[in-house]
Amino acid sequence: MINTPPKAPPLYPKSHLLAASGIAALLSLALLVFPSSDVEAKKTTLNLDLETPADQLTQEQDAQEQIQATPDVTASPFAQIENGADDTQETATAEPVKVEPAPTVVAKNPNHKEVVVSRGDTLSTLFEKVGLPASAVHEVLASDKQARQFSQLKHGQILQFELSPQGQLKQLHSKVSDLESISLSKSDKGYAFSREITKPSIRTAYVHGVINSSLSQSAQRAGLSHSMTMDMASVFGYDIDFAQDIRQGDEFDVIYEQKVINGKTVSTGNILSARFTNRGKTYTAVRYTNKQGNSSYYTADGNSMRKAFIRTPVDFARISSMFSMGRKHPILNKIRAHKGVDYAAPRGTPIKATGDGQVLLAGRRGGYGNTVVIKHGNTYQTLYGHMQGFAKGIQTGSNVRQGQVIGYIGTTGLSTGPHLHYEFQVNGVHVDPLGQKLPMADPIAKAEKQRFMQQSQPLMARMDQEKSTLLASNKR
């Protein structure tokens, strides 16, 4: 009889051994599934929950392999469309799909094509877009001097081409503005140019404004365009220095023409009447065309607003230095009379002749740099210094009209920054141009005074009525 040795008592409880065996089995399975250190690099989480079935781990592995095998959707902005992917996360990380611009050539029928002018386009590139050869461009431009207007293109302009069945140009048409269209038609005799001008209807409009910061901003808020604001400043430029006289609380009223086509305002016309209150003093202006066809502005009672000189040669500039006989020169650093007024403005700002006259000098003059000197009859003379350059046609001996641009703001000569140095002489003596009383032009002729008042009084009355209505509506 074989004696069996007694069994050694277990060192660990049975439940512990079972748990350890289960963990060991899972670890072995993990090593089989993820045999390398790539597990850590790919940041894949291994769930060691004892209740996780092994087939779930296999599903996670399959999912991981599927993700790695999926092409990079972000490699091309069109990859998502090409692959038909509809994954939300991929859509969010992909670059936006580029939208191609709308075609510049629109074909209503095979023989009619419209081309929209883009930046950089020339007449040659537009002809090429509709299939016309370069020789057609030369033929069009050589047909008539006026045909060259087709080469003066604007961004957004539309050119309409009518072609023959053989693809040759029969007609070229373009709308230059709301008021003007041009056409070129081909016949047996060649090309014929034509122009169509649409005559707008004229209506009047009223605006009222109060100056809070600047004239230009207040006028814009009131509804006046920049050109109309400049016109208003020109009308009152004899009495008001818009460089230094404007104050907060000043106000203006304007009645002006609007040009209308099919109910749409396409442009503005003349200022018919205006009123400007500056520092508590009110100035009025009425446009009047006499029997000879000459137009000018007069006060409401018929006195001419035009004077021999306008107050300032630069619109909306800042006065940087006043007329003084004891000013310290900023460069020479010594007391030296400043016999004029300095207007600071950006380089290139236009400078206007303050009165009619003849140019005595258009050239360099010592510390003044580029200078224009104008003689106005036998009594007055004006000087404009430190110019950047002279306007076209301005030269010694030429004649200029009041308000004509003669040059541009610069900093030539002894100058610390861009500005205009303006001098005013009466009988050879320098005077302060800001304090000088300017001679008046002639008033309305007696023979036309009654006709003028028949136009002036209704315009003044309308401004009063419009202003009262506007102020009453604002109080509601």
Image (spheres, helix red, strand yellow):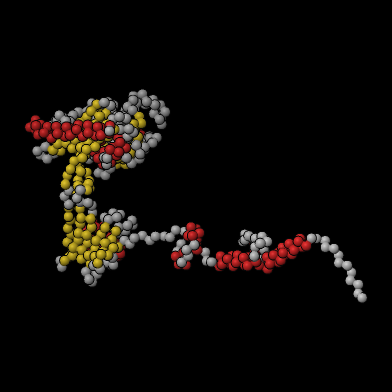
Q: Residue furthest left?
A: 447
Is 170 on the left or on the right of 414, as rendered? left
Front residue (pair 52, 433): 52
Q: Is residue 336 above or below residue 405?
A: above
The residue lying toward the viewer, choosing from 260 and 54, is 54
Most extreme residue toward the right, as rendered? 1
Q: Position of residue 18 (x, y in %)?
A: 75, 63
Is the C terminus in the top left, top right, bottom left or bottom right quadrant? top left
Question: Percent x, y for residue 16?
Answer: 76, 60
User: Residue 162, located in which quarter of the rendered image?
Assistant: bottom left
In the displayed structure image, the side of residue 16 where residue 295 appears, left or right: left
Looking at the rendered image, the quarter that the N terminus falls into is bottom right
- For residue 1, say whether it is visible: yes
The picture quadrant where one finds residue 247 is top left
| Residue at the extreme bottom of the image, as rendered | 1
**Residue 397 placed where, x, y %?**
23, 39
Identified at 28% across, 32% down, the residue is: 475
Is residue 342 visible in the rendered image? The answer is no
In the rendered image, the residue lying farthest to the top is: 326
Residue occupying the point 33% across, 41% down? 348
**Residue 218 percent coordinates (x, y):** 30, 36
Q: How many marks?
A: 0
Picture quadrant of residue 440: top left
| Relative height, residue 79 to residue 360 (above, below) | below
Q: Residue at x 65, y 66 (%)?
A: 54
Q: Residue at x 68, y 65 (%)?
A: 30
445 vs 51, left or right, is: left
Q: In the displayed structure, does residue 318 sit left or right of residue 7?
A: left
